[in-house]
Image: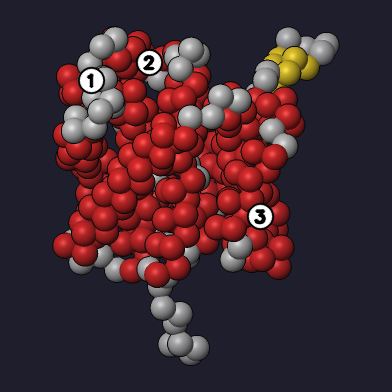
Amino acid sequence: MHTSAGSWLRHRLGRAVVLSYALALILPAPGRWLRRPHPLPPSHLTLHAAPLLLSLVLFSAGLQVPVRALGALLRHPKALLAGLALHLVIPLAVVPFVALLLQRTPDTDGGSGLLTAMILVVAMPVAAGATVWTDKGEGDQPTMVGLVLASTLLSPLTTPVLLATLSPLLSGGYTHTLAATGRLAQGGFALTAVVLPCAAGQLGALVLPARWLGRLVTTVAPSAMAGSLALTYVNASGALGSVLTRPRPLLFAAALAVAALVCLLSFVLGRVAAHLLRLEAATASSLTLACGMNNSSASAVLITASLPDKPHLLLPVLAYGLLQKTAANRIVTRLRPAPTAAGT
């Protein structure tokens, strides 16, 4: 149920993500402007572009998932429960391994800065943008939406547990910084920007006549993909400028290497789990994406708020954001379900 414009964008989503990062590097000013809150006179309301774009993505995802499909997911929750378990297990397996490798580097703090950034990434819920890649790859959208919602609803419990468990791997003041940053993550952001928009989409799918729903989806779906790209641009614009004003090539290489390792291991472990569970192609694709795609945008916001004097820690977060989208593009291409023969 896609327009020609939506189909065109779906097939070029990977390249469009890279262009979003390039645009943030070349022309960051509009993105920085969008990151700032904008009052709406004469009311006392304030416009925040990033949460609105995120809400659009989730509204579109909820709109495209039949309510019956979510009911079936609850009756057969193997993929959902596996995804939630892996969301906790993978950070506990990957981060200590990376910490061991970083201890062998000449960095005076054992790479604690880079490790702090990676912990904040992997402790976040499943990225809402994963629903866009699931749509591109014709994956199991009910499973993906269920994982985004469930991981977000559980994040006030799971995020502090992961941060507390992994913080002993850090040295210096990063342990206290991680604890303080975790407290910032436990606000109402997840409810207003993730759960409510997705629920609104589900309500629309439930009550709208099929004809109206079809028209709405063909309008909202490409808008959501464009919104996802805009959100990528806005987040990158807010971070790249402060990092590139004082370039540090060695730090950049280390951040890229650490982000690539964590991203690769997360996706590989998700793919192995999907294979062991013998999931069909569409569900395997969604589970793999959920394991590797964490809400790096939320991590970037938390680092900016809690560590304004350490903008270099945004480097691994931005690198992870780009790498997870690149990997997602490859995964949805390779695990795309085979087309059903006509007439069967």
Q: Marks 3/2: CA distance?
A: 34 Å
Instruction: Give residue 170's mark.
Output: 1
Of badges 3 and 2, the one in the foreground is 2
Q: Nearer the viewer, mark 1 or mark 3?
A: 1
User: Mark 1 or mark 3: which comes first in sequence?
Assistant: 1
Please state the horizontal and vertical placement of residue 316, each as a whole percent of the image.
Answer: 42, 34
Q: Earlier in the sequence, mark 2 or mark 1?
A: 1
219 sits to left or right of 136: right
Q: Which residue is mark 3?
A: 222
Q: Give the structural element (helix, strand or loop) at label 3.
A: helix
Task: Check disc 2: other Cα within 10 Å, few if <14, some if 14-19, many if 20+.
Answer: many
- Tell me if residue 264 comes above or below residue 161 in the rendering: below
Q: Is residue 148 above or below residue 11?
A: above
- Residue under the image location 52 percent in, 49 percent down: 61
Residue type at mark 1 is Leu
| Image quadrant assignment for residue 246 | top right
Residue 235 picture location, percent across and down: 58, 33
In depth, the one of 151 and 180 nearer the eye is 180
Residue pointed to by mark 2 = 181
**Image quarter hosting the C terminus:** bottom left
137 in relation to 342, above or below = above
Amino acid carrying mark 2 in the image = Thr
Q: Nearer the viewer, residue 201 or 3?
A: 3
